[in-house]
Amino acid sequence: MKTLIKSAKIVNEGNILNLDLLIEDDKIKQISKSINVKADLVIEAKGKYLIPGVIDDQVHFREPGLTYKADIYSESKAAVAGGITSFMEMPNTSPQALTQDLLEQKFKIAKDKSLANYSFFMGVSNNNLEEVLKTNPKNVGALKIFMGSSTGNMLVDDKSVLEDAFKKSPMIIAVHCEDEKIIQENIAKAKQQYGEKVPISEHPNIRSEDACYKSSSLAIALAKKYNTRLHIFHLSTAKELELFDNSIPLKDKKITSEVCIHHLWFSEEDYKEKGTLIKWNPAIKKKSDKEALFQALLDDKIDVIATDHAPHTIEEKSNSYFKAPSGGPLVQHALPAMLEFFHQDKITLEKIVEKMCHNPAILFDIEKRGYIKEGYFADLVLIDVNSPWIVTKDNVLYKCGWSPFEGEKFNSKVTHTFVNGHLVYVNGTFDEKRKGKRLKFVR
C-alpha cells in the first residue's frame, strides 16, 4: 500500500517545510520537495500542516474492570480523532497491573482493540517489588509509583519500598507526587470549617502546593541518591519548577517532568463554572501557577505535554466534593487545545510538536516514532488550522459522553490521522480494519 501526501507543511525538528511525503506499508518511505510515483491513495494537503502523531505518556483507559467509564477501544478511537497515535496507560485498573501476568493481559486486550499504538506501565505497590523487577525495559514504557493517593488507591507510602524501587529499578520510574500526610491534615482542616459540605474551591487548598512540593522533592532526592531515571508526572505548581533543570539536552537528563493540558488551560477561577468536572489530582491551582507552568514549558524546564486522560461518568462527577472522583477525559481535545495557544501567539507549532511528539519519544526511548523521518513508522496527523468547530456532546467520542471543553470553540481541526501508515481517521469517519502496535523501546 502506497500513500502520497502532496504539498504539506511538514512540522518537524524545529522547521516547517513544504514537502511531499510517501508512505509505503507502515513506514515513511520518502520525503522530498516533489514526489511523482503511482500511489494507491493521493492526499492533496496544500495549506495543511503535517505533524508526527502525538505520543501521550499518561492515560487511564479503565480497562480491565472499569469499562462502564471507558475502554481501550473507545478511548483509543477518541485519541486518534484528536491526533494522538500512541499512548501509555496507567496501572490503576481493576485488577491493578501489579504482576507481569496482569500487565500482559492488558497488552493482549489492546492488540485486539486499540486503534492507536500502546504501552502499559507496570504498577508498584508496597508489596510487589519482586514482580516489578522482572519488567522488561524493552517492551514496557515505565514503572509507575503513586507517591500520593488517587483513583484506585495505589499509594506507595513504605519508605523502604520506595528506597528499594529507586535503587533497583531497571528502567524509568514515573511518579504521581502528592504528600499524603499533608493532604489528610488539609482535609481535617476543611472538614472542621465546612463539615462534609466542603466546596470544590477548596480542592487546591487540600491538595496543596506544599503537598506537591514535598513529594516531588522526595522523589528527586531519591533519584539523585540512586542515580535513577525519574519522570515526574503532571506538575501543577510554580514552586516545583525550581526542582528542574533546563541547562542540558533532554537526552542527557536523568530527571524529567511534564505538564498536562488542564493545568495549562484552567485555573482555580474556573471551579465556579466547571465545579467537579475539573476536579483532578493534582488539583488545578492559581492563575499564577498556570502561567508559570506555561513559561517553564517554553523554557524547557518542563519536557513533555500529556493529558492524564481519566474519564468518569457524568453521574460520578456530579457528586459532592468528597464523593466526586478526580479526573476527566482529554485525549480528543488536547491537540486542538494546544493549537488554540498557537492561535493566541503563546507557542509555536514547532514547540507544540517538540513537547507532544519528539520529546516523549526521546524521554521514553521509543523506537522509530515521534518524528517525520524516512524509515520511521508513519504515525502522522494532518491539521487544518483554519477550520473552526465547537465542542458539543454530539461530537464527543469518549465513552463517558462529556468533556470539560463543551461549548469551547477551537479554530483548528485534525482532518487525517495515520497509525503505522494506515489512514484510520478522516474528517469524522474511521477505518478500523487495522489496529495499533505495541510500542518498543531502545534501551
Image: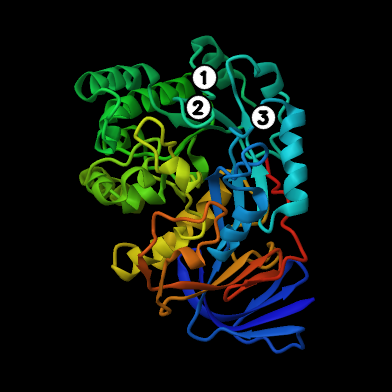
Q: Is residue 214 found left or right of 106 in the rendered image?
A: left
Residue nearest the viewer, comparing 347 with 118: 118
Q: Is residue 26 above or below residue 218?
A: below
Q: Is residue 106 found left or right of 11 in the rendered image?
A: right
Q: Which residue is mark 1?
A: 156
Q: Amino acid at mark 3?
A: Pro
The answer to whether the residues at label 3 and label 1 have Cβ atoms under 8 Å apart is no
Q: Nearer the viewer, mark 3 or mark 2?
A: 3
Give the alpha-carbon distance from disc 3 to disc 2, as whole Å: 16 Å
Q: Is residue 77 above or below residue 327?
A: below
Query: What percent of the width, then of the height, locates residue 101?
Result: 77, 30
- Residue 95: which disc? 3
Circle 2: element type: strand
Circle 3: element type: loop
Q: Nearer the viewer, mark 3 or mark 1?
A: 3
Q: Amino acid at mark 1?
A: Val
Residue nearest the viewer, comparing 60 with 397: 397
Query: What percent of the width, then of the height, locates residue 207?
Result: 32, 29
Q: Which residue is mark 2?
A: 146
Q: Is residue 197 above or below residue 268?
A: above
Q: How is the image coloured?
A: rainbow
The answer to whether the residues at label 2 and label 1 have Cβ atoms under 8 Å apart is yes
Q: Quarter of the image containing the N terminus?
A: bottom right
- In the picture, residue 190 is in which quadrant? top left
Whether residue 301 can be seen here = no
